[in-house]
Image (tube, helix red, strand yellow):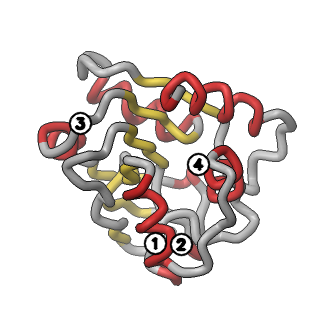
Amino acid sequence: MSGRVCGFEPYFDSCSRLLILGSFPSVKSRLVNFYYGNERNAFWRILCSFFGEDIPCTVQGKKEFLTLHNIALWDIVTSCRIHASADSSIKDYEVADILSVVKASRIEKIILNGGTAYDIFVKTYKDIGIPFVKLPSTSPANAKRGKEVVWYDELRRTFG
């Protein structure tokens, strides 16, 4: 188990309508200093495909994509002890102040990217008063087929 590691600040603006919460940034994400930095993670492929756009090549391009589509990103864990990128090893964690993002934006729905994000979220925020849904993790560690369909269905419900 490594020492305490800090995650990222939330990415959002006052027009954000959808908040997508992961568990904690992977090692590869921490290296590029932005969410879903592992090219094998399906997150950007699924999201950009839904909107019919190419995956931006830069962090700035990804931020512009998120802003254009009113999507906020954060992780439910802001700091913890973790071994490599394994969610199962997250210990001694601090939970994100989700209400600060909700109050400063127009969040209408929260998507939890995977079981760990969902489990930690409901311990603190089950009565948040905003619809939330657990979707299959986009992590390369989740080899289950069909996660794209589930994500597309939920994104269609959110964005029409």
Tell us which disc is closer to us: 1 or 3: 3
Q: CA distance from mark 1 to mark 3?
A: 22 Å
The answer for how far apart the CA atoms under marks 1 and 4 are is 21 Å
Residue shown at the point (37%, 71%) measured from the top left: 5
**Residue 106 numbered mark, or none:** 3
Q: Residue at x 37, y 19 (%)?
A: 131
Label 3 sits on what residue type?
A: Arg
What is the crowding at mark 4: few (fewer than 14 residues within 10 Å), some, or many (at least 20)?
A: few
| Disc 2 element | helix
Q: Secondary structure at mark 4?
A: helix
Residue 128 on image: x %, y %: 24, 22
Does 107 appear above or below 142?
above
Q: Nearer the viewer, mark 3 or mark 2?
A: 3
Task: Identify the mark nearer the N-term, 3 or 2.
Answer: 2
Crowding at mark 1 (Cα within 10 Å: few <14, some 14-19, many 20+):
many
Task: Left or right? Give the position of 118 relative to 72.
Answer: right
| Furthest-right residue in this view | 145
Q: Measuring 41% from the left and 63% from the top, which residue is drawn there? A: 81
- Disc 1 vs disc 4: which is toward the camera? 1
Looking at the image, is mark 4 or mark 3 earlier in the sequence? 4
